[in-house]
Every structure is written in C-alpha cells, then in structure tokens.
Image (spheres, rainbow, N blue to C red):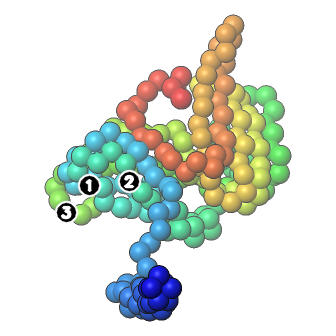
C-alpha cells in the first residue's frame, strides 16, 4: 500500500513543477525585479518627497519618489551607469588653494563624484524648484573611477589634509574626517566601500563623520 501511494505522489510531482514553471513564464511583466542591495537612509520623509542623485554641477542623473514617513529607499545603480561618460581626469577635481605637493597615483584617471539630495515638491508641480531642497546631506559620494587611483592633497582653507582611495568602477566613496591631537590640520578620507548604503542627515560641523 505504501509503495502504491509513493508512486502516485511521484507521478504527480513533475506535473506540479511544470505547472509552476508555466505560470511563472506567463506572468505579466516577467519576473519581479530582484533587490539591488543599494539604499539611501534618511529621517522620516515628508509627503511629496523625492531623492535625486546629482553631479557637482547640480545636474540630476537619477530620481525616485519617496513614500511619506519612510526612512529608507532602495535605489538602482544600473540606472546611472551610463553617467560614467561624464567622468573627468581626477587631478581636475582637486580644489583650488592647495598647499605643498599634491599627488595622484595615476594621473589622467577618469573619475566622477555624485551626491544624494532629498527635496519636497511643496507646490506639487512635479519639478524641483527653489526652496524645495531639504536640509539633509551626506559627505559620502557615489563614485566612478576608470581605474584604481589614490589622490593626496592639503588645503589651507579649510586647514585639511585629504586622501581619496577609489577602486575601479562604481562604488560608494565613504567619508571620514577627524582632528588629531596637537595639530590644527583635519584629516579627511574618501574611500571606496562595497556596502552601498548612504545615510542623509542634518548638516553638521566639519568634524562630523
């Protein structure tokens, strides 16, 4: 009796698998998108909020709406990959007013630095207008580098020594700054991190991390 029942179950199993596969193939829109693992975190969002990824010139390369009261949003790095064409020689990104010698491990390496911004569509016209930017920021950057590169320089105003260590391709360039004891020169780093998670926060002093 047990052998008959087992044969019956095994006989039905392939049909069940076939039905499951057929239903998946016929699903409208195909398979659901898989999570990207990339996200932006922030204080509870107001109604009508949007996240934008911007160039230093303020050009938006990616935008998504954010649900009211949410504190994080998944973002899709595939949507801004083509922006790498806007990368420039990394030495041109070194700010004016440096003191001493600036060093670049691989001069001419193309680099692009992008930053996140959140705004609220207060007049509900669907566009980002003056006065709609929220007072949230992150010193982390979305970074693209044509090859691994290290940049080292010091500025007089602010009195700060900076070191950028960027991996080839896209990454989150994590920001860290601190003031060592017995010196007035801040130490600041911008380093590629594989964890693609950015947190927006209220503006803080230069010593913030």
Residue 67 bears which disc, if any? Answer: 1
For residue 101, above or below residue 148:
above
Q: Earlier in the sequence, mark 2 or mark 3?
A: 2
Can residue 32 be seen in the rendering of this structure? yes
Residue beneath label 2, please? 73
Local crowd at mark 2 within 10 Å, few (<14), some, or many (≥20)?
A: some
Q: Give 177 or 1, whichever is nearer the viewer.
A: 1
Residue, far front: 1
- Element class at badge 2: strand
Residue beneath label 3, please? 125
Left or right placement of residue 192 versus residue 132 in this view? right
Left or right placement of residue 7 versus residue 156 in this view? left
- Element class at badge 3: loop
Q: Count the marks: how many?
A: 3
Q: Earlier in the sequence, mark 1 or mark 3?
A: 1
For residue 8, above or below residue 42:
below
Q: Position of residue 127 (x, y in %)?
A: 27, 61
Q: Position of residue 51 (x, y in %)?
A: 37, 54
Residue, far top: 182
Local crowd at mark 1 within 10 Å, few (<14), some, or many (≥20)?
A: some
For residue 125, above or below residue 44:
below
Q: Position of residue 69 (x, y in %)?
A: 24, 46
Decide: marks 1, 3 in contact (CB < 8 A)?
Answer: no
Residue 99 bears which disc, if any? Answer: none
Decide: marks 1, 2 in contact (CB < 8 A)?
Answer: yes
The quadrant in which residue 85 appears is: bottom right
Q: Give 192 or 13, whichever is nearer the viewer.
A: 13
Tell us which disc is closer to us: 1 or 3. 1
């Amino acid at each position: 009796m047990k052998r008959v029942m087992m044969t019956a179950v095994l006989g039905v199993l392939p049909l069940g698998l076939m039905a499951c596969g057929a239903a998946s193939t016929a699903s409208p829109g195909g398979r659901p998108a898989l999570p990207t693992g990339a996200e932006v975190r922030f204080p509870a969002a107001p109604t009508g909020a949007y996240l934008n990824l911007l160039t230093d010139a303020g050009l938006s390369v990616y935008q998504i709406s954010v649900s009211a009261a949410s504190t994080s949003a998944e973002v899709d790095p595939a949507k801004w990959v083509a922006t790498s064409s806007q990368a420039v020689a990394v030495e041109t990104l070194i700010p004016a007013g440096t003191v001493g010698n600036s060093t670049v491990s691989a001069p001419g390496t193309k680099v692009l630095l992008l930053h996140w911004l959140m705004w609220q569509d207060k007049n509900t016209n669907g566009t980002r207008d003056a006065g709609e930017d929220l007072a949230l920021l992150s010193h982390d950057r979305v970074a693209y580098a044509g090859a691994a590169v290290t940049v080292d320089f010091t500025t007089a105003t602010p009195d700060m020594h900076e070191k950028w260590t960027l991996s080839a391709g896209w990454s989150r360039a994590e920001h860290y700054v601190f003031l060592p004891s017995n010196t007035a020169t801040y130490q600041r780093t911008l380093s590629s991190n594989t964890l693609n998670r950015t947190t927006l926060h209220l503006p803080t002093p230069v010593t913030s991390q």
